[in-house]
Structure formats: structure tokens, C-alpha cells
Image (cartoon, grey):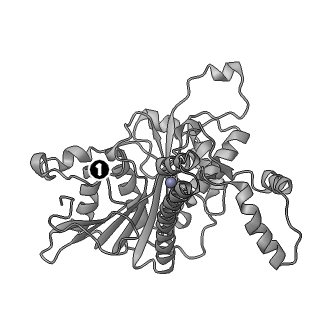
Amino acid sequence: MILLATFQWKDQIPKINEVNTAFGLREVSSSNLSKIRASRFPEFDVKRPGDNFARCGTCDKYKELRKDAIGGFEQAMKWTRKLEKHLGIARAHREYYYAKRYYSQTYPDECVTIMHDKMDHAKTASPIFSHKNKELDALVKLPVSVTGMIAHGHSDVRYAHYGLDIFPHDSNYTIESMTKLLRDLEEPPKSSFRELFLGSGSTALFRSILKGAEMCKTSLDPQPERLVGATPLPPILNVQMDNAIGEDKNRYIFAFWSLLVAKRIFREVYVNFMIVGHTHDDIDALFGRWSMLLKKENFPTIPALMKSFMDMESIPTIPHLIEEVPDFKIFILGSILDKSEVLIGHTKPQQVKFYLDATGCPKMKYKLFCTDVEWLGEKGAGIKI
Ligand SMILES: [Zn+2]
């Protein structure tokens, strides 16, 4: 799991020692903390300058300004205050998600909270070999992207969609992934009905990719004594996704959420966008643990890769191979506002809400920050519905 660029291990020592003292334990030194980290928590690492992970530009900016503050202490304090305010909003954003996640696990009949994220794709190109040699390096690798989803409190909970790079990663791909997940949530859990890859293998290419996929069946949870049936979707959907304008935060995806309420699949849809560089959520951690494993062992085929993700933890991540991506953008053309009426300002809010008004017309409201009290979006409030 990657920790914030602002995170410093040495800053944690006073907090750790405070707890140690309260329990009558010895204080820990900085060198001992390094040893504990290396032996017990190797998967937790701080972002380093120049690494590939998305960093938070705001944090970087405030830190630089604080470092170079002209005018001494007062100026530096100003940037510290700004940084703390920003970190406070990021924390509130995470806590909002934790609250929704808890609510969804406790009251699954009322809402489903879905965390949706894509894994860094360089790690999952198939085949994967932990030790390289010239012969293997000469082989062409199949680029495989993995989209991970956690549907808290519902059906099999964890799902992963594997897709070849023949599909562009745009709104159509996100919508296909989300609709497949919603269809799966309406079906009986795979752990009960033991049907993985039902309807898969539509072409010779996909059939050969899925060769040997039966091995994944052994990774399902033990079959319950009494079969578990399907449960209907609850009235409220909460989605937690990347703040990526190309794939997740654009008018096509918004039209899709709106369609879900217009078709009365959900009564309300709430979308919470994660702040770049501040995600550190459950799916990040799950991907982090998996990528550690991928460095250690060989996974010569895509089903072997899928199985390794299923076996990694007690809750298996249900695999699915994306074989088709319908063109939602074309489907919605003609029904979506365009030209002078085109949706504007929608890239700014951190939260959006979709619902039907009293006349049955689908509407959208937004909050710039999750800490705002009021939903905005009425006429003149800066965003066109
Ligand atoms: Zn930040």
C-alpha cells in the first residue's frame, strides 16, 4: 500500500511511543521502527519522488511553498495551515466513504456501496514471470488491464474485470464494467451456484485465453449447505471512483447514472470522486498486496493470474473477462444535451447525486466538497443539468 508523499515515518514515533507508554512498553527508536517496518509491514511504502503513482499536486505545491517561504515563520505557518486544511478535506472524504461502506454492510437492503478502481496495468501484462531470462523476454506479452470492484455487503463482494488492450479505456469501458457488476449483483452469489465464466468464450481468441479457467472454481468459497438465491438491488447506489475525467467523470458516465434512476433501477445514485494522491482505500491495499505476490511467483496464463487474485485473501475476488464493450456514447447520442446546452462545470465537484424530481424527471445535484452541507445545482448555481 502506498502512503501519502507527505507521510514521514519519523513523525509517527511520538504517537507510537505515546501508546507504548500508556501500555507500559519500552519506547521505540527510529532504527527499530525501520526494522519493524521492513519485517512486518513491507507492503506499506511512502511515495517517492519520480515514482509512477499519481501524486497530489495541491500537497506538493503547499509543501514547496512552505519550504521556500520568504518572510520566515509567519509565511511558513500560512502554508502549513493551508496544507492542513487540504489534508482535513481529504480525510473527511475518506471518512465519508468509510461511513457509506459501513452503512451498506449493515443495511444491505437499503444501499450498496461500490468502490471501483483500475490497477496499474504494467503489473498484469501476461505471462508474468518472477525471474526474467532472455528467451522469455523475447515473447510478446498480452497487455491485460484489471478493474477491481468491491460491492460492500452484497453478493460475492469482490470482483475483478480483466480486459485486453483491444478496448480503449474510455467511458464505454467503465460503463460496461459497471453494468456487468450490477448484473452480477442481481444474480445468486458465485460461491453458491459455482458458475464462473457463464457465457464467456464468445470468440476463438477469448476461448483460448480462458483455457484452463476451470482452475478458478477451486478458489471459490466452500458451497453453503443451503443454496443462496439472488437478492434484488437496493434503492440507493453509492459509487466511489477515480477523479479521471476521460474515464469516470464526464457527461456520458453522468448520463448513465441518470439513466439508472430514470429507469428506476435505483431511486438515488451518489458518486463520490476520490482525490488524486489521497485514495489509500481498501482497493488500493488489495491491489498492493496482489502486486507484491505477482513479483514473487510465475503466472504463465490469464486464468493463473485470475486464480492468484482469488486465492490471495479469504474473500475470493470473482474474475470476469471483458469480451465486448457496447458503445454507450452512440446509444445515448440524441438524448444527451449538446452544443449550447452541453453539461459544463461537472469536472469540479467531488460529489454528485442523481434522482427523480416530483414530476419523474431525472435530475442531478452536486457538492464541491463532501464537507459542504447543501446540495447545489438549482438554476444559476454554476452547473448545467
Ligand atoms: Zn493533497
Instruction: Look at 29% across and 50% down and name the residue there.
Output: 250
Residue 369: % across, % down? 38, 65
Residue 383: % across, % down? 21, 59
In the image, taking residue 261 as reference, residue 184 lies left or right, namely right
In the image, taking residue 37 as reference, residue 318 lies left or right, namely left
Residue 100: % across, % down? 46, 72
In the image, taking residue 25 as reference, residue 248 lies left or right, namely left
- Tag 1: residue type? Asn
Q: Is residue 263 visible?
A: no
Q: Secondary structure at mark 1?
A: loop
Residue 268: % across, % down? 30, 71
Instruction: Look at 23% across and 61% down and name the residue there.
Output: 259
Establish if 110 lies above or below 273.
Answer: below
Q: Is residue 23 visible?
A: yes
Q: On the image, numbered disc 1 is attached to which residue?
A: 250
The front one of 105 and 32 is 32
Instruction: Look at 69% across and 19% down and name the residue there.
Output: 134
Establish if 46 lies above or below 300.
Answer: below
Neighbour tally class for label 1: few under 14, some 14-19, many 20 plus, Cα within 10 Å:
some
